[in-house]
């Protein structure tokens, strides 16, 4: 049976669980702060704790693939299990892999994350469009078939991104706006929300771009990077209702106790609801 498109499933999850995405970023310093070793055993314990604490209550869990890949096949096995268990508990899984390539290589990346028969099948994946938006076509097509989503880098929270994303195209638009316009075209007519999202940093102050793409806006930078939920209306304006704020260290630093993780995630979700409502 074909599942609902990702945009519809995300809208429902945001409305019922709150508009919050929690990253699963098991980097060495965080493992150490939890009293865990920087090894596969520590990785597995960390990941299992986060999934068990949060997958039944947050809208989205976002594992950062690199922190699992660094342990080789055993780390990827931990990631596969986390994806399966998080989805089984009701969370949508956004794989933060930022893949971008052309042709058959992009098709292979799409099959890895967006094919239901893959052990790493996720509800959505992050991709980079800066080999040209058309290079993403294999991922966009695969997502449409499986009912998955694709989050495209547009205006990222790292300051270095501006030299590419704010560069000007021949028609005077910024490259970021060119990509956003492509996303809007992909989402045209979708209800209640399109399945092609944009990654737009919550730290930008003012996005300086038209964010009306009829799709979700993943907003990294809340918490440790300095942005707060109160900043969201100023950055996203009229599109703030489609924002999925992403928090990682701001929640994860409250582990390894599961209740600490839950309390932190709940607090962020409440602050986001208040900010979006006020905005």
Image (cartoon, grey):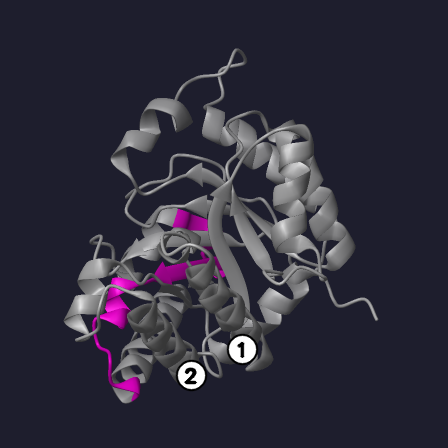
How far from the left and from the top, in percent, is residue 132? 58, 25
Judged left or right of residue 43, residue 255 is left
Residue at image coords 33%, 83%:
262
How far from the left and from the top, in percent, is residue 212? 55, 44
- The magenta segment is 236-258
Residue at image coords 45%, 56%:
240
| Residue placed furthest toward the bottom | 259
Q: Any mark on residue 85, and which?
A: 1
Q: Are marks 2 and 1 in contact (CB under 8 Å)?
A: yes
> Badge 1: how crowded within 10 Å, few (<14), some, or many (20+)?
some
Residue at image coords 54%, 79%:
16
Residue 141 lies in quadrant: top right
- Residue 183 in the magenta stretch? The answer is no
Quadrant assignment for the C terminus: bottom left
Q: Is residue 140 visible?
A: yes
- Relative vertical location of residue 116 with respect to residue 255 in this rendering, above or below: above
Residue 11 lies in quadrant: bottom right
Q: Secondary structure at mark 2?
A: helix
| Residue placed furthest toward the right | 1
Q: Is residue 15 visible?
A: no
Q: Nearer the viewer, residue 41 or 22?
A: 41
How far from the left and from the top, in percent, is residue 241? 49, 60
Exactly how many numbered labels are in the figure? 2
Q: Which residue is mark 2?
A: 52
Measure how far apart labels 2 and 1 are at the Cα level.
8 Å
Judged left or right of residue 204, residue 244 is right
Q: Secondary structure at mark 1?
A: helix
- Relative vertical location of residue 235 with respect to residue 55 in this rendering, above or below: above
- Residue 240 in the magenta stretch? The answer is yes
How far from the left and from the top, in percent, is residue 91? 53, 74
């Amino acid at each position: 049976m074909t599942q609902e498109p990702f945009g519809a499933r995300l809208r429902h999850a945001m409305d019922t669980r709150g508009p919050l995405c929690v990253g699963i970023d098991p980097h060495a310093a965080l493992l150490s702060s939890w009293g865990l070793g920087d090894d596969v055993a520590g990785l597995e314990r960390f990941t299992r704790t986060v999934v068990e604490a949060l997958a039944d209550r947050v809208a989205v869990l976002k594992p950062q693939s690199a922190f699992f890949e660094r342990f080789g096949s055993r780390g990827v096995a931990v990631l596969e299990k986390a994806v399966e268990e998080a989805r089984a508990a009701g969370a949508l899984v956004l794989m933060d892999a930022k893949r971008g390539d052309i042709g058959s290589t992009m098709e292979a990346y799409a099959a890895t994350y967006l094919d239901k028969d893959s052990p790493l099948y996720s509800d959505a994946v992050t991709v980079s469009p800066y080999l040209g938006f058309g290079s993403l076509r294999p991922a966009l097509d695969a997502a449409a078939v499986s009912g998955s989503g694709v989050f495209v880098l547009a205006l990222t929270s790292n300051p270095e991104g501006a030299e590419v994303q704010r560069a000007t195209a021949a028609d005077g638009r910024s490259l970021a706006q060119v990509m956003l316009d492509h996303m809007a075209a992909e989402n045209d007519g979708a209800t209640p929300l399109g399945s092609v999202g944009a990654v737009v940093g919550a730290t930008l102050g003012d996005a300086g771009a038209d964010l009306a793409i009829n799709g979700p806006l993943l907003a990294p930078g809340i918490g440790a990077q300095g942005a707060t939920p109160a900043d969201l209306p100023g950055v996203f304006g009229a599109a703030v209702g489609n924002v999925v704020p992403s928090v990682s260290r701001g929640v994860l630093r409250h582990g390894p106790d599961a209740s600490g993780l839950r309390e932190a995630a709940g607090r962020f979700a409440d602050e986001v609801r208040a900010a979006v409502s006020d905005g």
